[in-house]
């Protein structure tokens, strides 16, 4: 008897085709529409080209970069201290592609109308392939306004920072074709409370803005420690001040910047995060002495914006994976995407994704108009609102998308586990949820015109009675100042949802806006997949499902 005839136990069927080589821009109709709506339609071909790259070779590089985490080498084989972090070639491939696409530089080197929106869309695509490399690119992009506060420092550094050449060599800045910038602010004893920092700065000469200091202290979180320089905070006689600390001294020797270890993180594996010490590290003061927080906030505001982009993009990639799977997988003889309860879930996820994208792109539009008083006030407030709300929504939304794939969404061969691990970092980085909500209250109470700017933006509800009622409740909530800090999260959530509803109404797609308002403002659903009756869920799914 030939037992080998029975070795094949079954034929593999009902498997979803791989989602490989997808143009992440062309398959994303909402992204295309919001880019055009906020004056960046001119970037359509650039985004299509990068979308093809992101969905193909960069997606593959993202898997490799996560499978091969960065490795820290404190000493060379001869015992010399070197403090080097080694990355897989895929990491460098991702960095080179993002920098070449203008993620770190485009709005500064070509500040045309819609430049910030186009740059946000590029980051949105890149982040879907791999989020870890977005961290150093975000910091490099965001450092520019802070450095411009110190013109002589900016003159020396900005040409390399704004270069579209990625140069990972560990060399002094004068010998490089491009530079990346990191941040090192958090200390063990203070965390978010940077005013509790103990790192000290001692002037080498006369001291003051633009002058050299030596820094002594530690930083509990220093992300991307192979960057060419870092914006950091240290105490002087006049208080907390901001400094630019390069990896190399002017004579070409290594600065006294010592990596203690790399962080073992929940996610963000491709990116190296570290603990560092300054042992007389040479650094140059940026901005006014004792005004380190207002100086660094120029950078922090933009990195918070990138947290919005990052979480929105993770949600979009999770949605893409879920809708693609359900469009090809059958259960009980029917495609999952044709089954009513799954349609409810997927349509709900699609609404969450587009609402996050809409608010993010609207922020990009505000940044494109920095000299408009209304837009400036809008950005001041909505950076914190959007950073809080979108980053809070991402983990649960991605988990729901993961569940759509069942067990297949729980294994590392798919991207879903990586997206889920990545999701919490943006709600923590640059200030946790409570910090953002308190910042919302601070902006509303201490900065004239901010509350008026919010309600000017929200308008009268655009003829929708449900949104009008929500706005009236919001007005009433602000009139009641009792225990307002206790209620800060609820207020921030109500503002965020109102802004998203208003944007979707303005865009003119009644299917999307009606479903969002019915579920987020008028509805009582607690989990995804609780959309009310009477919505066109098929249209919502067709809008967000890749054409594969």
Image (spheres, rainbow, N blue to C red):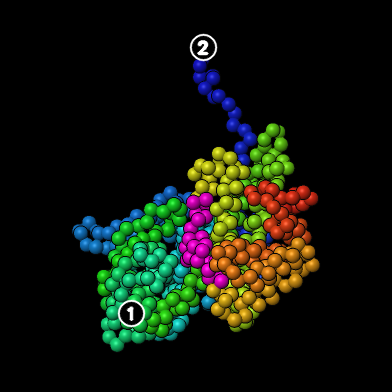
Residue 384 lies left or right of residue 279; in this view the side is right
Which secondary structure dominates the residues rendered in magenta?
A: helix
Residue segment shown in magenta? 419-441
State which quadrant residue 27 falls in. bottom right
Residue 316 lies left or right of residue 158; in this view the side is right
Name the residue nearer the viewer: 388 or 313: 388
Q: Position of residue 223 (x, y in %)?
A: 40, 63
Name the residue nearer the viewer: 209 or 94: 209
Q: Earlier in the sequence, mark 2 or mark 1?
A: 2
Mark 2 secondary-structure assignment: loop
Residue placed under numbered mark 1 in the picture: 236
Q: Position of residue 221 (x, y in %)?
A: 38, 63
Residue placed under numbered mark 2 in the picture: 1
Q: Which mark is residue 497?
A: none
420 drawn magenta: yes
Mark 1 secondary-structure assignment: strand
What residue is rendered at 73% in x and 42% in y?
A: 340
Furthest residue in direction top, as rendered: 1
Let me know if residue 270 appears in the view: yes
User: Real-space Cα distance between discs 2 and 1?
Assistant: 87 Å
- The image shows residue 31, relative to residue 156, as above or below, that is above
Q: Position of residue 291 (x, y in %)?
A: 42, 80
Circle 1 crowding by C-alpha within 10 Å: few under 14, some 14–19, many from 20 = many
């Amino acid at each position: 008897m030939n037992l080998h005839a029975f070795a094949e136990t079954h034929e593999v069927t009902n498997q979803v085709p791989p989602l490989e080589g997808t143009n992440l821009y062309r398959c994303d109709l909402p992204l295309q529409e919001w880019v055009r709506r906020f004056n960046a339609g001119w970037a359509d071909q650039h985004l299509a080209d990068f979308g093809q790259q992101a969905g193909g070779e960069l997606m593959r590089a993202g898997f490799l970069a996560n499978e091969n985490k960065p490795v820290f080498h404190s000493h060379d084989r001869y015992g010399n201290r070197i403090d080097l972090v080694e990355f897989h070639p895929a990491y460098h491939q991702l960095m080179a592609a993002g920098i070449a696409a203008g993620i770190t530089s485009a709005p500064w080197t070509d500040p045309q109308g819609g430049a910030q929106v186009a740059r946000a869309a590029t980051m949105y695509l890149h982040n879907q392939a791999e989020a870890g490399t977005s961290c150093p690119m975000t910091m490099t992009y965001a450092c520019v306004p802070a450095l411009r506060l110190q013109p002589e420092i900016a003159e020396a550094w900005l040409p390399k920072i704004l270069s579209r050449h990625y140069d990972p060599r560990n060399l002094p800045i004068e010998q490089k074709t491009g530079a990346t910038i990191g941040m090192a602010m958090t200390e063990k004893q203070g965390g978010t409370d940077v005013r509790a920092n103990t790192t000290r700065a001692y002037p080498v000469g006369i001291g003051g803005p633009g002058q050299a200091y030596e820094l002594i202290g530690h930083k509990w979180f220093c992300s991307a420690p192979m960057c060419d320089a870092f914006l950091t905070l240290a105490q002087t006689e006049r208080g907390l001040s901001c400094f630019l600390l390069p990896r190399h001294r002017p004579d070409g020797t290594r600065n006294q910047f010592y990596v203690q270890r790399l962080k073992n993180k929940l996610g963000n594996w491709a990116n190296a995060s570290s603990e560092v010490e300054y042992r007389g590290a040479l650094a140059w003061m940026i901005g006014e002495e004792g005004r380190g927080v207002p100086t660094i906030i120029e950078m922090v505001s933009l990195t918070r914006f990138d947290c919005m982009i990052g979480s929105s993009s993770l949600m979009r990639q999770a949605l893409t994976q879920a809708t693609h799977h359900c469009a090809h997988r059958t259960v009980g003889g029917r495609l999952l995407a044709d089954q009513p309860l799954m349609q409810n879930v997927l349509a709900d996820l699609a609404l969450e994704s587009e609402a996050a994208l809409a608010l993010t792109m609207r922020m990009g539009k505000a940044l494109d108009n920095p000299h408009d008083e209304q837009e400036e006030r809008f950005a001041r407030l909505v950076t914190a609102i959007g950073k809080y709300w979108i980053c809070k929504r991402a983990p649960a939304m991605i988990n729901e998308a993961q569940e759509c794939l069942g067990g297949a969404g729980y294994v590392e061969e798919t991207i879903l586990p990586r997206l889920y691990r990545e999701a919490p970092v943006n709600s923590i980085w640059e200030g946790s949820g409570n910090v953002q909500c308190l910042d919302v209250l601070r902006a509303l109470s201490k900065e004239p015109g901010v509350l008026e700017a919010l309600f000017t933006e929200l308008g009268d509800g655009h003829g929708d009675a449900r949104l009008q009622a929500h706005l009236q409740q919001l007005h009433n909530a602000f009139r009641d100042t009792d225990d307002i800090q206790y209620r800060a999260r609820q207020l921030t959530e109500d503002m965020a949802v109102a802004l998203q509803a208003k944007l979707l109404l303005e865009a003119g797609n009644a299917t999307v806006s009606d479903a969002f308002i019915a579920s987020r403002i008028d509805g009582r659903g607690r989990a995804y997949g609780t959309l009310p009756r009477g919505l066109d869920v098929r249209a919502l799914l067709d809008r967000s499902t890749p054409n594969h």
